Image (cartoon, rainbow, N blue to C red):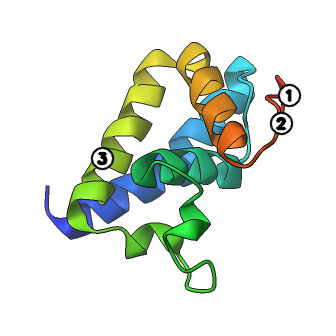
Amino acid sequence: MTREQLLARYRELVLHRLPDRARAEGWVVTADHCFGRIVLDHAVAGRWYDVLDRRRSPAFAQLDDDRLAAAVALAERIDAEGDPLLRRLDAQSLAWRGKPATGGR
């Protein structure tokens, strides 16, 4: 995929597809910004705002090509595996922030 295709796919998955499925299927996370947090954190292996400029929006557009491709691949994997994977990824994202996994967001 080209960078523009990756950016479009990221937007589609994180802002629309995953939140829509999550609400319909009762996943642990339902808000688009939470999906963004989880996917971005895993793309940079830590709190995304420690790596990317939180004042520059959108944050995902700041990812280099390799990290952007990894973010899209992870979002695709969440779409394929659903809530069980999402729970694990959310717990790790929250742990990077020093917060306990809550089981619901």
For residue 9, above or below residue 22: below
Hey, what amino acid is under mark 1? Thr
**N-term mark: 3 or 2:** 3
* Residue position marked by numbered label 3 in the rendering: 70
| Number of residues whose C-alpha sits closer than 10 Å to that of mark 1, classed few (under 14), some (14–19) or many (20 or more) | few
Q: Point out the image quarter for the C terminus.
A: top right
Q: Secondary structure at mark 2?
A: loop
Task: State left or right for residue 103 relative to residue 15.
Answer: right
Residue at the far bottom in the pictured view: 55
Q: Residue at x 75, y 20 (%)?
A: 26
Q: Nearer the viewer, residue 38 or 33?
A: 38
**N-term mark: 1 or 3:** 3
Asked whether the residues under the numbered discs 2 and 1 touch, taking CB atoms below 8 Å apart as contact, a structural biologist would say yes
Task: State left or right for residue 93 relative to residue 61.
Answer: right
Disc number placed over residue 105 in the picture, else none: 2
Q: Nearer the viewer, mark 2 or mark 1?
A: 1
Image location (x, y in percent) of residue 101: 79, 28
Q: Point out the image quarter for the N terminus.
A: bottom left
Q: Residue at x 59, y 56 (%)?
A: 47
Q: How many marks?
A: 3
Q: Secondary structure at mark 3?
A: helix
* Residue position marked by numbered label 1 in the rendering: 102
